[in-house]
Amino acid sequence: MDVVETASALLIGNELLTGKVKDENLHVLATTLRSLGIQLRAALVVPDVPETLVTEIDRLRRSTDLVVTSGGVGPTHDDVTMQAVADAFGEPLVENTEIRALLERVYGERLTEGHLRMALVPRSARVVITNDVPWPTVVVQNVWIMPGVPQLFRMKLMALRSQVRGPVSFHSQAVYTKLDEGVLKPLLDAVVSEHPKVEVGSYPKWFDDRYSTKLTFDATSVAELHAAVKHFLELLPDGEPQWQE
């Protein structure tokens, strides 16, 4: 299993940028990577423009340990991701015999040249097949090429989970309070200063009678996490209602 620290996401498709389709993959990818102990450093949405894809794939593969693409891997004219990945690595597309054999079994006499396009992969690509995910997932060095269809994307995330993990585990805790951010700022500044290894987030909520601000605390050390939360709670005014999760 590969140990990777950082990741990036490249969401591909004109339909995302025109609002024709709502992205459902970034959130599930982010939570999956977080559960594996991998930091998602960047996420980018780009159109089906080969030159743009090549540039961004090459940039992301060099700047993060892992790249996950989403979209553009079907048989139609606008499915240009596989060629773009090949170009980013300076490789030709070649037919993968495992994928071709699978396509032949699935489509039989209905198999077309369009279907066979899905068997073309960059020359150095490997395919990941698991018991849970029998349909091959194409990987070129540190780039995982995933479909944009949410159901298929989620399925193939199981293959990714079987192959990579992060070097640490992330631990999180949330605190809800009715104080607004203006009041909370000096408290949070004190916590951040005292606990530099704990990431603190503040998220206001409007028009909700239950709370005004959600505070999140994230760390790789449980002890440091608990110390930061305890410090924050001690700074709250006496009697201030709050709850945790």
Image: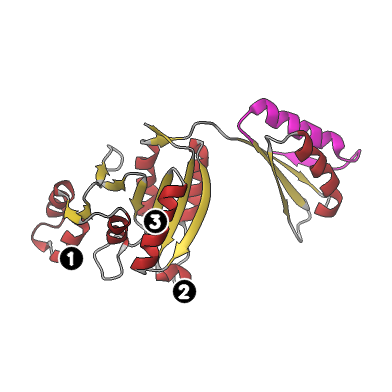
* Extent of the magenta region: 219-245
Residue at the spot 17% in from the left edge and 54% down from the top edge: 94
Q: Is residue 227 magenta?
A: yes
Q: Earlier in the sequence, mark 2 or mark 1?
A: 2
Q: Which residue is mark 1?
A: 114
For the question of whether residue 51 can be seen, the reply is yes
- Gap in angstroms between the C-alphas marked 2 and 1: 26 Å
**Crowdedness near tag 3: few (<14), some (14–19) or many (≥20) residues, C-alpha within 10 Å:** many
Left or right, 9 with reference to 103: right
Mark 2 and mark 3: span between their CA atoms? 21 Å
Disc nearer the start of the sequence (2/3)? 2
Residue farthest left in this picture = 109
Residue 57: mark = 3
- Under mark 1, the amino acid is Gly
* Secondary structure of the residue carrying numbered label 1: helix
- The location of residue 167, given as percent across then percent down, is 49, 31
Query: Tag on residue 18?
Result: 2
Q: Secondary structure at mark 2?
A: loop
Q: Is residue 134 visible?
A: no
> Whole-percent x and y of residue 183?
86, 50
Q: Along the horizontal axis of the image, is 158 left or right of 37?
A: left
